[in-house]
């Protein structure tokens, strides 16, 4: 047993406090801790909520610890699981060089274990993000590659929630919204505590035009995993859902916080929000920062890329107000 999850429950009046901590059983190292204060109106509902939250918070820390553990071993001694754990840590950063290194690690994992579904799924995830970040030249072909890897994962294990999530995301990007939502719901049925799966489901709902449902889903993902382990991705998508519903003032704090990840898509959402709010000087600063990350942002490019998405018009309207050129 490598890790131990400890916890305690205290009850006072009509309230309950649950504390949890994840510990490395070998070294005694304290990895993470959390505290949950709830009213005891419905004990079973509180129990289910806290269980989902604990699992959602613990999983990213386990990947990180295993990634660090694997990195300390000689390269030739790392098994497929260790390679995958290292790759997850790198992919969390949304950095070009780390993305490419993660892809190399995942290909090594697949060479070691060709039927390792999670490795195939994560390779699809890595390629999708490289495409979304304009790190690969052919957007359409790269999304197709990501979809192929997700389908490879599903052939090996149809119960892998990552495989379902990545395949659903690729379907969403292609405008196949009904199929996408079905796959993403299947991922969450397999693992209701999959915080990243919830935020991606919210993103797909947003693209499909289910704005209110998207807000609920993205808000739930943020509550499940309040520490945004994917470099501002959660706050970006929640902020984008608020932009789609024209709640621009509410969206702004989330989108300002999200650009810590320095990802082009995060800047686009923030620029649009600033444009709607008339914060033109601030928007121009973000446009300049965004243009250092890749080809200059253009309305015509984003109009084409967002052609299948229901939030396109309000998104482009804000960008135009901010001064993004055609």
Image: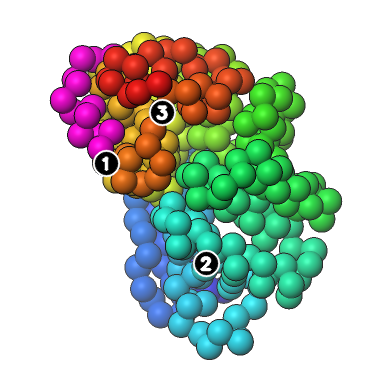
Would you say the magenta stretch is mainly helix, strand or loop? helix
Q: Secondary structure at mark 2?
A: helix
The residues bearing labels 2 and 3 have C-alpha atoms spaced at a distance of 29 Å
* Residue located farthest toward the right when viewing the structure as drawn: 155
Point out which mark residue 298 bears: 3
| Residue 260 placement (x, y as % from top left) | 29, 45
* Residue located farthest toward the left when viewing the structure as drawn: 281
| Residue 215 placement (x, y as % from top left) | 45, 21
Q: Which residue is the site of mark 2?
A: 101
Q: Residues within 10 Å of mark 1 (few under 14, many from 20)?
A: some
Considering only vertical position in the picture, is 65 above or below 164? below
Q: Which residues are magenta?
A: 276-288
Q: Does label 1 or label 2 sit earlier along the sequence?
A: 2
Tell me the residue at 67%/61% (across/down).
119
| Residue 101 placement (x, y as % from top left) | 52, 67
Nearest to viewer (mark 3 / mark 1): 3
Point out which mark residue 289 bears: 1
Closer-to-camera residue (11/4): 4
Q: Secondary structure at mark 1?
A: helix
Q: How many marks?
A: 3
Q: Residues within 10 Å of mark 2 (few under 14, many from 20)?
A: some
| Residue 189 placement (x, y as % from top left) | 68, 36
Q: Does label 3 or label 1 sit earlier along the sequence?
A: 1
Where is the C terminus found, in terms of image quarters?
A: top left
Tell me the residue at 63%/70% (across/down).
81
Considering only vertical position in the picture, is 186 above or below 73? above
Nearest to viewer (mark 2 / mark 3): 3
Q: Is residue 286 magenta?
A: yes
Nearest to viewer (mark 1 / mark 2): 1
The residues bearing labels 3 and 1 have C-alpha atoms spaced at a distance of 14 Å
């Amino acid at each position: 047993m490598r890790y131990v999850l400890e916890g305690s429950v205290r009850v006072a009046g009509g309230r309950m406090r649950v504390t949890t901590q994840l510990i490395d059983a070998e070294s005694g190292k304290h990895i993470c801790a959390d505290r949950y204060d709830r009213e005891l109106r419905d004990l079973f509902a509180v129990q289910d909520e806290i269980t989902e939250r604990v699992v959602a918070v613990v999983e990213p820390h386990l990947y990180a610890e295993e990634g660090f553990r694997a990195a300390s071993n000689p390269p030739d001694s790392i098994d497929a699981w260790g390679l995958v754990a290292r790759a997850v840590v790198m992919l969390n950063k949304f950095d070009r060089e780390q993305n490419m290194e993660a892809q190399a690690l995942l290909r090594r994992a697949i060479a070691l274990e060709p039927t390792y579904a999670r490795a195939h799924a994560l390779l699809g995830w890595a390629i999708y993000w490289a495409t979304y970040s304009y790190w690969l030249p052919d957007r359409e072909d790269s999304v197709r590659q990501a979809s192929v890897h997700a389908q490879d994962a599903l052939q090996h294990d149809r119960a892998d929630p990552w495989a379902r999530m990545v395949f659903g995301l690729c379907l969403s990007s292609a405008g196949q919204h009904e199929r996408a939502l079905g796959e993403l719901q299947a991922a969450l049925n397999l693992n209701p505590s999959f915080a990243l799966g919830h935020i991606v489901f919210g993103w797909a709902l947003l693209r499909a035009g289910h704005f209110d449902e998207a807000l609920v889903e993205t808000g739930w993902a943020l509550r499940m995993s309040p520490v945004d382990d994917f470099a501002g991705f959660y706050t970006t998508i929640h902020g984008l859902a608020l932009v789609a519903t024209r709640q621009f003032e509410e969206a702004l704090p989330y989108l300002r916080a999200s650009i810590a990840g320095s990802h082009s898509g995060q800047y686009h959402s923030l620029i649009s929000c600033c444009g709607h709010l008339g914060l033109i000087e601030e928007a121009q600063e973000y446009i300049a920062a965004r243009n250092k990350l890749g080809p200059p942002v253009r309305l015509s490019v984003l109009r084409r890329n967002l052609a299948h998405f229901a939030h396109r018009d309000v998104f482009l309207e804000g960008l135009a107000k901010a001064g993004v050129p055609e």
